[in-house]
Image: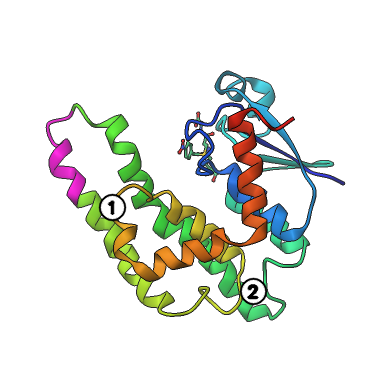
Amino acid sequence: MIPTITAFERSPDGGQGLARDMRVRWALEEAGQPYNVRLVSFAAMKQPAHCALQPFGQIPTYEEGDLVLFESGSIVLHIAERHGGLLPDDANARARAITWMFAAIGTIEPPIVEREQVPFTERDQPWYEARLPLLEQRIRDRLNVLSGRLGTADWLDGGFSAGDLMMVMVLRRAEGMDILEHYPNLSAYIARAEARPAYQRAFAAQLAVATGNSG
Ligand code: GTB
């Protein structure tokens, strides 16, 4: 059964591949699975029909027969568990790859998203300028460890996995913050992931929505 995912009808990033449907598209491409996309407007996302799929009124969602999933990490894990190419066969290596997925979402992403959001939510506050360097240091604290752990390896734990997929997507959200540039091995890690044919197909598909060429 071909799954249907949801994505922004008009992504605020204009097709930079930063919205969370990109993770799901990439996972499906790595798995070699065809998929349909239903584009939703911001207004439609908050309507009961969409909230029945995603209680918080957000994208992405994943529908496959009777199964409805939300949360990009859960969707990527579901895809990875059912298809080859995203998780190792060895049970312990598999558990470690899943651990990196959680590390991406639970440890690396929060400080990045907080720094990303603060200009929109706190710019008028008297503490805004003083808070920025603190938030940026929190990101560096995490990236120092991640960079040290990756070292000169291509991927976080052996071959490419769903852990790398989630980590790269999370790291990409720090683009433009003048932080990633100071970690050459993380920049190379992202570039290596972006060079994967599956990534490129997923990126092109979401860009086609932004440019109106998605057919
Ligand atoms: N934890 C959920 C998941 O991982 O699936 C979070 C889902 C989520 O935040 N969805 C966002 C959304 O639907 C889109 S991805 N927002 C609309 C709303 O909440 O009303 C977040 C996102 C949005 C835009 C950019 N961008 O423009 O760069 C990047 C990331």
Mark 2 or 1: the one toward you:
1
Residue appearing at x 73%, y 63% in the figure: 81
List the residue tagged with mark 1: 178
Q: Is residue 178 magenta?
A: no
Element type at mark 2: helix
- Disc 1 crowd rating (10 Å Cα; few below 14, some 14-19, many 20+) is few
Q: Is residue 90 left or right of residue 120?
A: right
Q: Residue at x 84, y 41 (%)?
A: 65
Tag 1: amino acid? Asp
- How packed mark 2 is, by other alpha carbons closer than 10 Å (few <14, some 14-19, many 20 or more), is some
Q: Which residues are magenta?
A: 125-133
**Which residue type carries mark 2?**
Arg
* Residue 70 visible, this orientation: no
Residue 131 shown in magenta:
yes
Give the distance between the C-alpha atoms of the residues marked 2 and 1, in whole angstroms.
33 Å
For label 2, the residue is 94
